[in-house]
Image (cartoon, grey):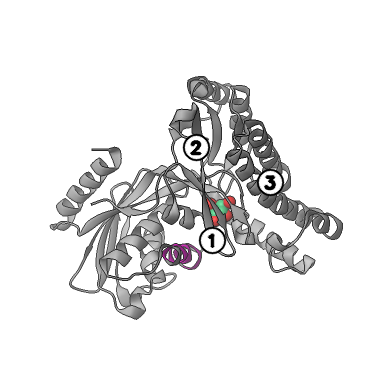
Amino acid sequence: MNDRDALAARLATEFRARLGRPPAGVWAAPGRVNLMGEHTDYNDGLVLPFALDSATLVAVAPRDDDLLTCLSLDRPGGAALHTDDLRPGAVTGWPAYVLGALWALGWPQTRQPGLDIVVTSQVPPGAGLSSSAALTCAVTLAAAELTGLEPDRTTLAAAARRAETDMVGAPVGIMDQMAAMHGQTDHALLLDCRSLTFEPVPLPGQDTGLALLVVDTRISHTHAHGAYARRRTTCEDAARTLGVQALRDTTLTAVETTLVGEQQRIARHVVTEIDRVRTTVTALRHNDLTGLGETFAASQASMRDDFQISCPELDLAVDTLLDAGAHAARMTGGGFGGCTIALLPDAAVPTATTAVTAAFKTHGLTPPRAFETRPSHGATRVC
Ligand code: GLA
């Protein structure tokens, strides 16, 4: 039995202990790491995420009445609400993600049955690994499968995103939910966030002697909602100044000749970052580790200097990983804390991990958490 199956079995047992009956099933959806294309999704651009091998699990059973309940094995709080009362503002905290997913699927309008939902997660919250999309996608898939709704996975991803934007009030893009729904083992997803079409891109497998190492700085990005929303507004303002629908539709020349100040900085990141997604895919396809390293370095510099979403801890982790032999390293996710992702030789993983821990200690920082990961598959029913 692997970790996920064991956790699913424990969740089912806890469900039965707390609610006095077994769940109808357990569903899981993964967190994600983004390899390239940060803050490009809500600019209709390109992204290159992969699904993590750790997931959020939900055990769910329909009820005879119209009550929607949720509780977590990991966190205090929970909710119990009649379906008719489900609307933005009615729930707060983590239950807003769970019930928000049902709201986004149209629960009140379509008069779906009440549900009991119990949650547990292997994805750390606030680490920039998209624990929120893992949660909303797990609930969305479970609810759809249980009630016989048959929307495709992209429609479910869109509903999971609406749970965040409309119910929780976080103006996120579509990258995380698409990664959680469509992730493929050993592949990243080259996703066009305008057309929502995607293409799997093979990542170096175990036989290549390369490893993917995540370093969680443990700087929680949960305080960053306001800063994320401000970046997004600046992008929209810049697109308006340029007279385009989204920053995807402009060029570096237009950005540098038409925009000034903050709008120029912010738009330059987006335009060059979209290009770096293409360069990254080319480098991966040609096994060009030097090109990959250069593209990651340019992305990190752009996020630090132009978009200004890095932080000293992320910069320190990236620099230390590169000094310790990583071919490529950059921060990943929304920024202001969270994680870095690096591609490095298998043999360098222990030394790189020790080096990052030592560097954080020297700077008086909380010890980071480093772990190897492999690209995994998207949301699924576990049992
Ligand atoms: C968060 C959001 C995503 C995306 C990234 C930055 O993870 O949820 O939609 O904007 O930040 O690339």
Tag in front: 1 or 3: 1
Query: What residue is disc 1 on?
Result: 197
The numbered dot on residue 218 is 2
Q: Nearer the viewer, residue 37 or 164?
A: 37
Some atom of ligand 1 lies within 8 Å of the CB belonging to the residue at label 2: no
Residue 368 on the magenta span: no
Tag 3 secondary structure: loop
Some atom of ligand 1 lies within 8 Å of the CB belonging to the residue at label 1: no
Query: What residue is disc 3 on?
Result: 308
Query: Mark 3: few, some, or many residues within 10 Å (few <14, many ≥20)?
Result: some
Q: Residue at x 25, y 47 (%)?
A: 8
Image location of residue 79, percent across then percent down: 31, 62
Residue 139, placed above or below residue 35: below
Q: Residue at x 36, y 60 (%)?
A: 95
Label 2 close to label 3 by CB (< 8 Å):
no
Query: Which is nearer the N-term, disc 2 or disc 3?
Result: 2
Q: Is residue 260 visible?
A: no
Residue 162 on the magenta span: yes
Magenta stretch: helix, strand or loop mostly? helix
Please name the amino acid that badge 2 sits on. Arg
How far apart are the two marked residues, 1 and 3, measured between alpha carbons? 29 Å
Residue 212, placed above or below residue 270: above
Query: Which is nearer the N-term, disc 1 or disc 3?
Result: 1
Where are the magenta residues, as a range? 156-166
